[in-house]
Amino acid sequence: MENEHVSLEGEQVRMLMSCPMCGTDHLVILTLDQYQRFLDSRIKGMYIQTALPDVDPATRELLITGICPACFSIL
Ligand SMILES: [Zn+2]
């Protein structure tokens, strides 16, 4: 994903995702642990719901597709 900007603030990882449909920026905040599991799931091809069961589904959707909840609801 080229449209993501990741910054580390203490124990938080902030990812700015641009929605490909509406162009709105959305901030996703993960813990370092969650972010590590997210990267792992990408490398291993794991399902994100398996890797991040403690992250809500709308946020997981943002992580996978970058599509924001508002656009996702009209798909
Ligand atoms: Zn959107």
Image: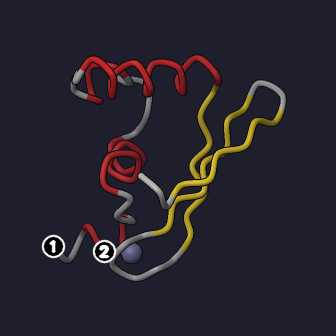
Horizontal side of 70 relative to 29 (left or right) equals: left
Q: How many marks?
A: 2
x 29%, y 30%: residue? 48
Q: Which mark is residue 2?
A: none
Q: Is residue 59 left or right of residue 74?
A: right
Q: Is residue 62 above or below residue 7?
A: below
Q: Which residue is mark 1?
A: 75
Indicate the amino acid at tag 1: Leu
Viewer-proximal residue, 15 or 59? 15
Q: Quadrant of ligand 1?
A: bottom left
Q: Is residue 22 shown above or below 67?
A: below
Picture quarter with the C terminus: bottom left
Is the Cβ of the residue at disc 1 closer than 8 Å to that at disc 2? Answer: yes
Quarter-wise, where is residue 27 in the image? bottom right
Q: Residue furthest left?
A: 75
Q: Nearer the viewer, residue 71 or 21?
A: 21
Question: Residue 14's spot in the image, x, y percent?
Answer: 67, 44
Which residue: 76% across, 36% down? 8
Instruction: Estimate the x, y position of residue 59 in percent, counting from the top left.
Output: 42, 47
Kindly identify which numbered label has been placed on residue 71.
2
- Establish whether ligand 1 lies closer than 8 Å to the Cβ of label 2: yes
- Secondary structure of the residue carrying numbered label 1: loop
Question: In the rendered structure, which amino acid carries the disc numbered 2?
Answer: Cys
